[in-house]
Image: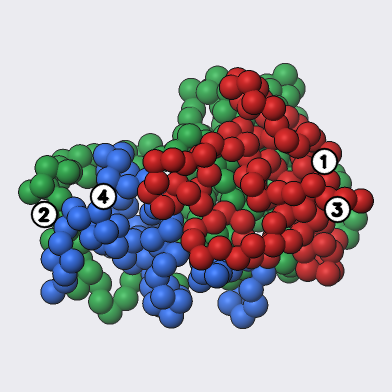
Chain colours: A red, B green, C blue
Amino acid sequence: MSLRASSMTDGRADRYAPGARVRTVHHDPPHHTRLPRYARGKRGTVIEPEGRAPLADVRAQGRTDCPVEQVYAVRFAARDLWGEGEHDVVLDLFESYLEDDQP
Amino acid sequence: MTGTTHSDALISRRVRRLETLLEDRGIVTGAAVDEAIDAFLTGASAAGGARVVARAWTDPAFRARLLADGISAVTELGLSAGGVQPQRLRVVENTADTHNVVVCTLCSCYPVRLLGPSPSWYKSEAYRSRVVREPRAVLAEFGLVLPEDVAVTVWDSTSETRYMVLPRRPEGTEDLDEPSLAALVTRNALIGTAAL
Amino acid sequence: MARMNDVGGMQGFGPVDTTDDTQPFHADWEARVFALNGALIAQKVYNLDEFRDAVETMPPAEYLAASYYERWFFAIRTLLERKGVVAAGELDD
């Protein structure tokens, strides 16, 4: 499964490749964000980049200086989100929500 | 969350006043609002998604293109997955070992152009809060009990990608043509809360 | 600060009412609200992320008590006042 890499069109390299281990930031912003509370500070695996989009956190403030970022589909094990469960949850996350996960 | 409340008449009056104000200020016209409502009600139904599934079941090359790039593939059938902002479409395939189910925990993102208006339960707090935490329990409430060895993936639509499930083709349908197959496909199967 | 819309994993909302309703609107005003919001975004009065943000700023008790399109109407009024398209209080009774 791979979406067409629209990310390749503007010459900027993606920070994460499919299979990269990442950790979501553990922030708690006072503004709009598309990183749900249940997925903050969690370890996951990048499925693939999905294409660049204006960062919703900034765009939601009606600002004109909105950065455009890669969005990644990231897979999380239920056990890593909730401490139990056998299923996976996939979220689409802006690059600035993600950090390298040191093994 | 209820569909109507005791304050329906009050809200109705307020909405009318707002629309009048916006018309007076040249921002909208009543005719355009009427048109948008008509277009939404007539143009959007789950029939589009069902057509896509029937084609994928009968045309392996199309199925491969659909799974690789949903937007391009549905465009081949004259369909659009588009919304207010540019969107991508990811079609996720159910198999003998994997089951997919779609949600938007933060609001109510949904592939409206392919599936039509979303059902109320999709927008409910009960569904949005629980399906990421205990999908099997939620699916059981829909009457879908999955074998223990089937892996479940929940897709939380947190960005502008929209998701549609490609359900498994029912057994005994080898002789059916595409329109007959499309008629078997339900809205819930395209969201992942039903099997066929 | 988490907002009331951010319900993933939250307990207590009970079983899902799986009724397969086919009517997207339960009253005419809901359809008007839906279409007005689309028009305001298309006219770039505000964008979709600002709209989502405005829904989320609804006080939690009000958010939970409100129907889906009541939330939308709240957000539209919030944004139109913020953008100065309507004056504060102009839409009140």
Q: Are marks 1 and 4 on the same chain?
A: no
* Distance CA(mark 4)–CA(mark 2): 11 Å
* Distance CA(mark 1)–CA(mark 3): 25 Å
Q: Is residue A62 left or right of residue C5?
A: left
Check the image and name the residue furthest to the left.
B24
Q: Chain of mark 4?
A: C
What is the three-letter code of the residue carrying label 3? Val
Q: Are marks 2 and 1 on the same chain?
A: no
Residue for badge 3: B150
* Distance CA(mark 2)–CA(mark 3): 54 Å
* Distance CA(mark 3)–CA(mark 4): 44 Å
Q: Look at 64% across and 26% down and name the residue there.
A: A12
Residue C79 pos. (x, y %): 29, 57
Residue for badge 4: C36
Q: Nearer the viewer, mark 3 or mark 4?
A: 4
Residue for badge 2: B20
What is the three-letter code of the residue carrying label 1? Ala
What is the three-letter code of the residue carrying label 4? Leu
Q: Nearer the viewer, mark 1 or mark 4?
A: 1
Report the label total: 4
Question: Residue A20 shows which numbered tag?
Answer: 1
Crowding at dot 4, Cα within 10 Å, few <14 / some 14-19 / many 20+, comes out as many
Instruction: Note whether B36 is above or below A51 in the view shown.
Output: below
